[in-house]
Amino acid sequence: MTTAAFVPQQSIRRAATIAWATALGPITAQALAERDDVTLLAAREQLDGAVELELMEKHAVLVGYPDLYTVTIAGRRLARELAGAGGYIYPEGLRTAGVNIREARHMIACAGVIAALERRYPDHRIIGERVLQLDERTQKRRLASVQIRRHGQMRSHVPDVVIWPPGTPGEPPPLPIAVEVELTLKSNEEITAICRAWARCRYVEAVLYYVETTNMAEKLLDTIERLKVEEIIVVNPLIEILKPLPGFPLDDQ
């Protein structure tokens, strides 16, 4: 079995980053810099080095926005092989993540939010949508997703991020906190349906929204106040958690 004594630390760090990206999906150099508390240049060099080794792929999807990095099959193989030496958990059972233009801004923002939450709460388990869906399939029950009714039909709604607080021995496991990263001004009908679903949910402690603009925040707050769910759903500006990024005005529009 491979041990840490025979594996260069640079390889272990690279493999750990690849394992993180495998779980999260597309990541940015900005998110990695935030998570690992390194400079943006150092994070970019690490990711570009993985690209040169064909362990990751680089996607310049939107002009003026950060590049996205995804894991290749070779990268996944390396991260799986070095998990024992690196002391990290390799996320089994996830498909290779892809990138599309329509979701690119949201992917960039979610990567940054998850990285910032991991820095803030190092003793918590912070997972994204991909791992949550895998966990729910494995356990065959809802853990942090909800059902919403739209146009007379029920569909599943999955939060962008879930925060799992650490448990206390001898006590019931704490409930998770769902996190929504909101970059789109949704219709009143959809906002209402989602907020009602969260209000009915009994297996989530609270819901935390991070919204890009003041207009989005005001529309969401109007719905929350109308439904009287202020104790369950909290709204914060995205700039409170996400450092300014190219392409994200994070202003009062």
Image (cartoon, grey):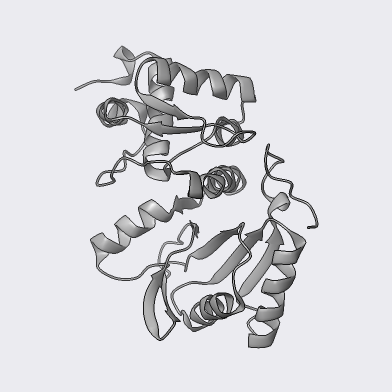
Quadrant in the picture for residue 144? bottom left
Give me the residue at 52% from left, 72% from top.
205
Query: Which residue ends up furthest to the left in the rendered image?
Result: 1
- Residue 53 vertical position relative to residue 122 in the rendered view, above or below: above
Whether residue 182 is visible: yes
Give me the residue at 53% from left, 82% from top.
196
Query: Which residue ends up furthest to the right in the rendered image?
Result: 252
- Residue 176 vertical position relative to residue 92 in the rendered view, above or below: below
Location of residue 226 in the rendering, given as x and y in whole percent from the top left corner: 68, 86
Assign the C terminus to one quadrant of the image: bottom right
Quadrant in the picture for residue 224? bottom right
* Residue closer to the observer: 66 or 110: 66
Whether residue 230 is visible: no
- Residue 59 vertical position relative to residue 96 in the rendered view, above or below: above
Location of residue 104 in the rendering, given as x and y in whole percent from the top left corner: 51, 44
Give me the residue at 69% from left, 45% from top.
248
Location of residue 84 in the rendering, given as x and y in whole percent from the top left corner: 28, 30
Assign the N terminus to one quadrant of the image: top left
Give me the residue at 38% from left, 43% from top.
23
Location of residue 48 in the rendering, given as x and y in whole percent from the top left corner: 48, 19
